[in-house]
Image: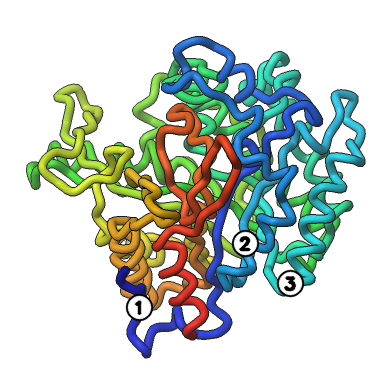
Amino acid sequence: MSNLSLPSSSKLLDHDFVFGVATSSFQIEGAADSRLESIWDTFCATPGKISDASNGLVACEHVKFWREDVELIDSLGVDAYRFSISWPRVVKKDGSLNDKGMQFYIDLVEELVKRNIKPFVTLYHWDLPQHLEEKGGWLNRETAFHFEHYVNLVAKALGDRVYAYATLNEPFCSAYLGYENGVHAPGKRGQANGRKSAHHLLLAHGLGIRALRRNCPDTKAGIVLNFTPCYPETQVAEDIKAAKIADDYINQWYMRPVMEGLYPDVVELIEPQNRPDILPGDMDLISQRLDFLGVNFYTRLKYRSDGKGWYEELQPKGVVTTDMGWEVYPKALSELLISLHQRYTLPPVYITENGAAMQDEIKHGRVNDQDRIDYFQSHLNAVDDASQQGVDIAGYFAWSLMDNFEWAEGYEKRFGIVYVDYLTQSRTIKDSGLAYKQLITSR
């Protein structure tokens, strides 16, 4: 097993730089019988939606084994743990607080604080209560106000014991994958659905920031966006333009409203009936000051012109890929961070997710995942490169702490630095987890 290393001059080795691990509620918690149904429960129960026909009803049974899991997190030497709150676990159908569900997170946060592990809480990681979806979900503007009410309840219960709150995780995935091309819950399709839900999600973010500032003004408040840098297939003008349109549609559609209160110019290329309904004051609400920006990065994509003024996505060929089929191209991470730094006035940036699904096998109690160690090494180097170029990067979170329910892929893809045997729920730290621990504890 090779170790992870960084140059001694790297700011990533400073003691105030945060190294962490990340998970999300639906992917690990289980205990579905003690919460309301979410859109992912419904989606999983729909034949053909999940590749291995599995669901999140049991997952990693984190609600049952959370104390052992915190012990495991502590053993890795990390500074922080990023996890999400299950909205269906903490809010009853009538809008009142589910005290028992909330107590689970209070206990979790208190145990993390006791161990000097910073809690990073994500308020929405895709598990919308199903009863709200039945009233239109993110296509219904009212859902954004239900979200504000939920954030109010959580912020009052957890307060400033939480180090940092993120309103949303990857609104692109919620809107585009969930409401525009339908491969994620709730499985709706259509451009108008995608654009409308995206606007309501961003509105929810703004309302959520307002609720956080009201209830715990001394805690960091921000958002987590995923970025897939868009590269042209060739240097022909049409392909360069197509990649720019793709970047506006996929990445800047979320980044620019949050940072500048404006949608990118690509909005003009969309037929008027497919554009979101923007009410007075919406964009000011969406673009409130952030204490941090979370950046999730996994891969890049290449694009060419479709000959009709739009873009066409190309599948990676002849390159190194992960088990998800995603190209390993760490240079895109440093180029992304530098480009964001040059384009926007950024708050401190956390790399809130970075990692790789690999074909892991456990042999004699050990998982030799050198390919994942190599992935982490090259991407930590990319983060360091961006840091040297003046990007204010405050932390890095490995995705993910443990193997878990990987959405439409079910349990077939393993992202964890800890191996989970789903039959016995035993956890085994992979070589990548040991290498990550070695890097963190050697500072």
Q: Considering only order in the chain, which callout, 3 or 1, is on the residue closer to the N terminus?
A: 1
In the rendered structure, find residue 72 and report the number of the disc placed on it. 2
Q: Please name the residue shown 77% across and 56% down the image.
A: 108
Q: Which residue type carries mark 3? A: Arg
Provide the secondary structure element on which disc 3 rests: loop
Q: Please name the residue shown 61% across and 29% down the image.
A: 56
Mark 2, residues whose alpha carbon is within 10 Å: few (<14), some, or many (≥20)? some
x, y percent for residue 288: 65, 54
Displayed quadrant of residue 139: top right
Of labels 1 and 2, the one closer to you = 2
Q: Which residue type carries mark 2? A: Leu
Q: Which residue type carries mark 1? A: Ser
Q: Is residue 439 left or right of residue 127?
A: left
**Which residue in the structure is indicated by mark 3?**
115
In the rendered structure, find residue 5 and report the number of the disc placed on it. 1
Contact? badges 1 and 2 (CB < 8 Å): no
Q: Considering only order in the chain, which callout, 3 or 2, is on the residue closer to the N terminus?
A: 2
x, y percent for residue 195: 50, 27
Q: Quadrant of the N terminus?
A: bottom left
Q: Please name the residue shown 61% across and 40% down the image.
A: 60
